[in-house]
Image (tube, rainbow, N blue to C red):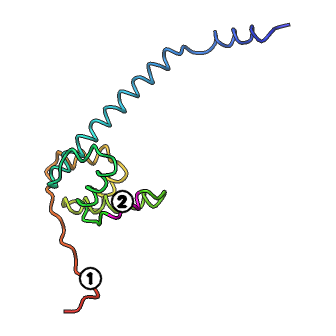
Amino acid sequence: MINLFTIAMLQSETEPSSAAGAAIGGVMMIIWLAVIVVMIAAMWKVFVKAGEPGWAALVPIYNIVVMLKIAGKPAWWVILFLIPFVNLVMAIIMSLAIAKNFGKGTGFGLGLAFLSPIFYPMLAWGDARYQPQPLAPPKYATA
């Protein structure tokens, strides 16, 4: 009769080496850290291009407030970023507005929303200039 210890020993000898898994995990962590560093640098540069302090990219909630300011949206919208699923819609709207204020189109704005690690560095180190759009007067105003 085979006991549980023998089965455990047989399984441990047939499993692949955990060193390979650790190496893959280490490489993935280095890649992830590199993406984070590039995103922080890109956000810093975008903030500076828009006339905002670059260090604001490092402060968690404040960076959303600054991004809303760059997008030309009210700061109270940061509350909407705390609501699940609503925050996804708000992020898309904000990305479209940021792209517009940097002279880019809707496609670039969608790229900012869905492929941020690619499009924010393009915005940061590209030739885009911050040109905030003037707010349109309310439609119900009378002259």
How far from the left and from the top, in percent, is residue 119? 28, 48
**For mark 1, does the 10 Å Cα neighbourhood hold few (<14), some (14 to 19), or many (20 or more) residues?**
few
Above or below for 107 versus 30: below
How far from the left and from the top, in percent, is residue 110? 34, 57
Q: Is residue 71 magenta?
A: no
Q: Amino acid at mark 1?
A: Pro
Image quadrant occupied by the C terminus: bottom left
Q: Magenta region: which residues?
A: 76-81
Residue in view at x 39 percent, y 28 percent:
29
Extreme residue toward the right, this view: 1
The reply to whether callout 1 and callout 2 are in contact (CB within 8 Å) is no
**Relative to the observer, which residue lies in front, 81 or 45?**
81
Return the residue at label 1: 138
Q: Nearer the viewer, mark 1 or mark 2?
A: 2
**For mark 2, does the 10 Å Cα neighbourhood hold few (<14), some (14 to 19), or many (20 or more) residues?**
many
Question: As drawn, is 87 to the left or to the right of 62?
Answer: right
Question: As drawn, is 8 to the left or to the right of 22?
Answer: right
Mark toward the start of the polypeptide (1 vs 2): 2
Determine the image quadrant of residue 13.
Answer: top right
Residue in view at x 31 percent, y 43 percent:
117
Q: What type of secondary structure mainly makes up the magenta span?
A: helix
**Relative to the observer, which residue lies in front, 61 or 84?**
61
How far from the left and from the top, in percent, is residue 54? 19, 46
Q: Which mark is residue 78?
A: 2
Q: Which mark is residue 35?
A: none
